[in-house]
Image (tube, helix red, strand yellow):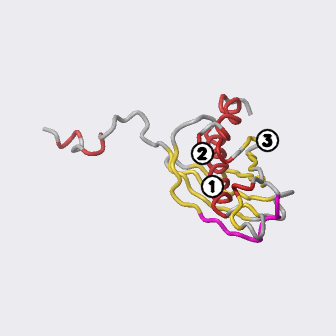
Amino acid sequence: MTSPILDLLPQLAAGAAHTHALGFTYDSLDGDRVRIRAPWREDLVGDPDTDVLSGGLVTTLLDHVGGLAVWIALGRFEPIATLDLRVDYMRAAEARRGLIAEARCYRLTRSIAFVRAWAFEDGPDDPVAAAQSAYMLDSSGDRRPGANLGRPPEDRR
């Protein structure tokens, strides 16, 4: 795949203030599957008795890697917004281990992208969590802002 988005992936994975603060890093791209990592850090632990990463971090990781998968599918960066995100937690994460998240955008429409993602330590065949999500795309085309608020041209006589 040759696309300007490929050069931006490391920055998109970790360049925002919140992703940088959480320690997210770009891992790899294999076809249309993108991977990022989240480290284990004591400040990211959800329950100090278990030393596993918090569920909120897992959700954030899956949402973010899903957005990256959308940009890969589009072949460009454009504004997107999470419309729906379902996370199924399948097992507890392992103590004192970081996570890898992998996502794939499996369907694009004019206005919505559909993504599946997984978070795991070693491989996607043993996930900590799996996600199904939908992202809103910028489907305005070349219309000016607010164009949909006026009457159609045929009614403007």
Locate residue 91 relative to residue 82 in the image: left or right: right
Which residue is located at x 16 percent, y 39 percent?
Answer: 156
Which residue is located at x 75 percent, y 58 percent?
Answer: 119
Q: Under tag 1, what secondary structure?
A: helix
Nearer to me, 139 or 119: 119
Which residue is located at x 66 percent, y 57 percent?
Answer: 57
**Residue marked by disc 2:** 18
**Number of the front mark, 3 or 2:** 2
Which residue is located at x 74 percent, y 52 percent?
Answer: 102
Q: Is the magenta stretch mostly helix, strand or loop?
A: loop
Nearer to me, 130 or 93: 93
**Residue marked by disc 3:** 28
Residue numbers of the magenta segment: 86-96
Q: What residue type is labelled 1?
A: Thr
Quadrant containing the C terminus in the rendered view: top left
- Tell me residue 154's x, y (percent): 21, 41
When asked about the image quadrant of residue 71, the answer is: top right
Locate residue 30 relative to residue 138 in the image: left or right: right
Nearer to me, 69 or 61: 61
Q: Residue 51: which numbered mark, if any?
A: none
**Residue marked by disc 1:** 60
Q: Which amino acid does label 2 sit on?
A: His
Sequence-wise, which precedes: disc 3 or disc 1? 3
Sequence-wise, which precedes: disc 3 or disc 2? 2
